[in-house]
Amino acid sequence: MITSAVVLGTLVLWGTLVGLDLVSVPQMMIARPLVAGAGAGLLLGDLGAGLVVGLVLELFQYAILPVGAVRYPEYGPATVAAVAVAQAGGGGATAGGDRGGVLALGLGVLVGLITAMAGGLSLHQLRRLNARVVHAADAVLEAGDPRALARLHGAAIGRDAIRAALVTGFGLGLAWVARFAVGTLTARDLALLDAVAIGAAFAAAAAGLLRVVGTGTQRRWLAAGLAGGMLTAWLA
Amino acid sequence: MKPPLGVSLLRLFAVQGSWNYERMLGLGVGVAQEPLLRDLRSGNGDGDGGPVYRAAVARAAHFFNAHPYLCGLVVGAAARAEHDGASPEQVERLRRALCGPLGSIGDRLVWAGWLPLTSALTVAAVALGAGGWAVAGFLLVYNAGHVALRWWALSAGWRHGTRVAVALHHPAIIRAQGLVGPMAAFAAGWCLPLAAVWLARPLPPWGMTAAALVAVAGVSALLAAPRLTAQRLGLILIAVALVIGVAWP
């Protein structure tokens, strides 16, 4: 649970770093939901909740192939917000072991998906703004001024940091609202939301993977992996 | 390592920092390439660097798009071509020629290969109980490949210059492209049942059935309607479940 301004501040800072990592710097994949979720879980004192939410949103991420200039949702800051909701519902330190562990998972995923959409839109707007700034600086760039080049580049990274902080703030605002909903819903309602969120995540992952592997040999490798996974799950 | 190559490598980690719809990665490439062009400066470096240097910096920041991890190849190759006295037209042609191959190789190698492979193994490890260690392992292993690829691209570009196509036909690159896709597909398939068991365990029996039904219906809908995104589907389904939950006494 977000118990203090310090925790809130570190969550916003983590969300900002995660948002920067997606495109700007350094692309070391802390923006992946599993990593962003684990980080948020640690900050909130509940790694288990972070891993559960992170894993579900990681499955949603499988539907995205970030090639070229394609527009896609941004799951990093969204996962931070989603963990804040799920963790407020009881936490997931023993995820898979007790009912309380995933009680607010569905609501968390809902907040995460909305925030991811906002993140994707904000990225598109940022790229358009960057294009306008670069266009306006054409003459300086064509003159080959290295300082102007570095300044433009650095300012764009600064804008992305502000964008990521705002998206994280928006997500945490939604999380704050959603925490009230957690208290008004019954255990059955919350379990239904969890089930639907988990089902939708697997649908996203399966459809995304089928598109990526195509119809050739890789689909056979996917099928072999599925068989291996079922066997491992049965043995484990 | 030559010092300018080290600075250039560090700057490559922010190559997408000013991504935009006009020059795409151009500015980031220019910023990363600039340290490698400093030898072209005339005078003692206190002035504006001279026309050769400034023209090279301007060219470096022109439109460019490719996979970010492989941009080092164009940064190194174009800088080397500038040092070797290639004409501006040759440098521009080199950059244009590299856009497509670097995008396609990078997408296959990283976005559709290395990343899903390591991510799927992490999902499986979390589901098997490795917890936070799985995530730490992912960051270490993924980034070992990530940094190695960035460094290889920059050094190969600098080494080969205008003959950089040789680097793209390196046997290791060709073999890696052939291996990483099937490995990623296998790992992705392997992690799904493990993740399903782990996530569904706390659900009541009717919840497990509901999750399975949503998954089957959802994947059918996503494959039948390509314009429907997974994110929209998730939002719709969870919103409907919320309404059902609230309305059902």
Image: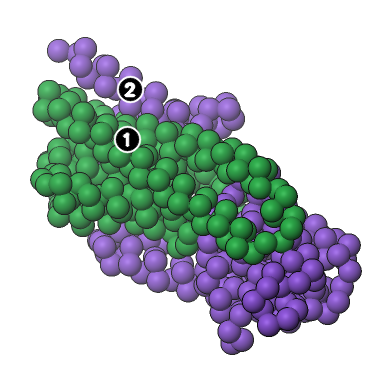
Chain colours: A green, B purple
Q: Residue at x 22, y 42 (%)?
A: A84
Residue B89 shows in the view = yes
Pick the quarter of the image with the C terminus of chain B.
Answer: top left
Q: Amino acid at mark 2?
A: Ala
Give the x, y percent position of residue B148: 55, 75
Q: Is residue B215 left or right of residue A107?
A: right
Q: Along the line of sight, which residue is nearer the eye, B28 or B213? A: B28
Seen as rendered, the residue at the extreme front is B47
Q: Residue at x 16, y 51 (%)?
A: A6
Q: Amino acid at mark 1?
A: Phe
Contact flag, marks 1 and 2 (Cβ < 8 Å): no
Residue B215 shows in the view = no
Q: Is residue A158 left or right of residue A149?
A: left
Q: Residue at x 15, y 24 (%)?
A: A185
Picture disc at residue A170: 1
Give the x, y percent position of residue B178: 66, 65
